[in-house]
Every structure is written in structure tokens, then in C-alpha cells.
Image (tube, rainbow, N blue to C red):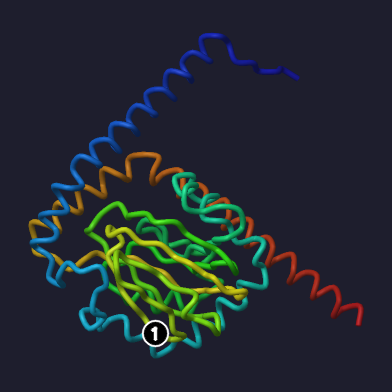
Amino acid sequence: MIQQTNTPNDTAVAASEKSEKSTLDRMVMRTGRKLRKLIAVLQSRQSLIGDTPVLDTAHFPEFKVLEDNWRDVLGEVRDILKFREQVPKFHEVSAYQKKISKDDDWRTFFLYGFGTKLKRNCAQAPKTAAMLESIPNLQTAWFSILAPGAHIPPHKGVTKGIVTCHLGLIVPKNRENCRLRVEDEYCTWEEGKIFVFDDTYRHEVTNSTDEERVVLLWHVDRPMKAPARLLHKFFVAGLKKSSFFKNPQKNMETFEDRFEQATRDAAQTLERMSTHD
């Protein structure tokens, strides 16, 4: 057997490529930070739904299908929660979330990531996926699972070009102690109800209860006039060239494999048990 080893020159080339990639990432993120404020001003002025921390859901009649059929969504997430330990923590999907996602407090089961449908994950929640497919300009969607006693510290989103939406699925009985703060406004989840907010405002989540909270979370493009929409499109395209997007995409595929294997193993175990009976 011939064993292949890296030469010093190979190592140097790899290190150089890694350095160039890191430099590109830093340039993209640095340019993004400088541009975000300028872009946000234009997006705010050209927003067709206002620019408040919490937005009126009446602007999004296409979301009604999720409220009308929320029990179907709940049934599918309950099946997914049977394999809770195979659902990744948010910081396992994206290392950029380490400041706000710690330990086992926040798990995320992605259905859509950065405009890409995770087909095998969606097969675990087909009714939910079909409803999400009917929503125009969908960017991401996942089941957001927050542990009892969890706290997501104050943070801001990347771009005002998208808005964040939550559908309450499993809500602690004492829901006043499980809430989202967006600037000076507070939102509490209600099973089967949706609220929409602008995550570029500082926001945080506190679950001061001994119960789990589960929501369907998704992002859609903010309704804006054409110039702002075009600028948003180019800004997101630039971010997608960096590891800010590429690394989580790879991680999502890995965890999709892991979850599918777990469900397959469970099905095979049940089949063997029924055969023995």
C-alpha cells in the first residue's frame, strides 16, 4: 500500500488558501457591517410595512395557512422531538451563534436554510414543509426548541431586508414568564398564533419556566420598493460567498444525515420487535 503524505509545500499551499479564505470572510463581514447601516436606512424608507420593532401580521395574509393548520405542524414537531438529542444546538449549526446559544438551551431543526430546502428534514415534517412552500420569498425555516430556564441574550439580526416570524406550538402554561423582548416591546407566544418582528432591533428571549417552548420560526423578505429589494438581493448574494453562510450549510447537511439515521434505526428496532412478537 502506498501511503500519501503532505509535503511541506502542500502544507504551505493549504495554509495560504486558508489564510486567503479567512481574509475574504473578514472583508465580506467588515464591508457588510459598514454597509448595513446605509442599506438599513434605504430599506426603512422603502419598507411597505413600516419600520417598527413588532409588525402587523395583517401585512402577511399568506401566513394564515399556518395558523389554520397549526395542529398539523404541532403533530409533526412532536414526532421530531422523540429524537430530541439528535436535533442540533444552534451553535453546532452555526459557530457564529456561540455568543447567544450555549449548552443544550437552544436546539434547531432546519427545514429551509439560506434559501435551500433540506429535503430529508422536510420529509420528517411534510405537511409543514408544504405550507412553507406556499409562502413567497421564504429564506429560512426551522423548529426552534428552547429549554426550561433558557435565556438568549440581547442581539441583533444581520439585515433589515428580512423579517422574523414565529408560530407558537408548545408554550409553557405560565407564558408571561416566557417571552421575547424587542427593544421596549414584549411578545408572548400563544399556541396557534403568529407574530412578526424586525430582528435588527435588539431583542432577547427569556424562558423563566420549568417547561420547554417550541415554535416554528421562519424568515421572509421584507416587502419593499424595487430599489431596496434589488440592494437586498445583492447584499445577501455577497454574504453567501462567505463562511457565514457556507459553513452552516455544510453542518445542516451533516445533522440531516444524523437525524435520518436515528429515525431509520428506530424504525428497524420497532420492526425487529414486532417480528419477534
In-image side of 181 versus 97 (left or right): left
Residue 89 vs residue 146, the one in the foreground: 146
Quarter of the view holding residue 149: bottom right
Which residue is located at x 39 percent, y 43 percent? 244
Which residue sits furthest top?
A: 8
Which residue is located at x 55 percent, y 9 percent? 8
Q: What residue would you read off at disc 1?
A: 193
Which residue is located at x 35 percent, y 86 percent? 65
Residue 28 in percent (x, y) is at 28, 36
Asked which secondary structure carries label 1, the reply is loop
Please name the amino acid that badge 1 sits on.
Answer: Lys
Residue 192 in percent (x, y) is at 43, 86
Residue 68 in percent (x, y) is at 39, 90
Instruction: Work out which quarter of the rendered image holds the C terminus and state it.
Output: bottom right
Which residue is located at x 17 percent, y 67 percent? 51
Instruction: Work out which quarter of the rendered image holds the N terminus and state it.
Output: top right
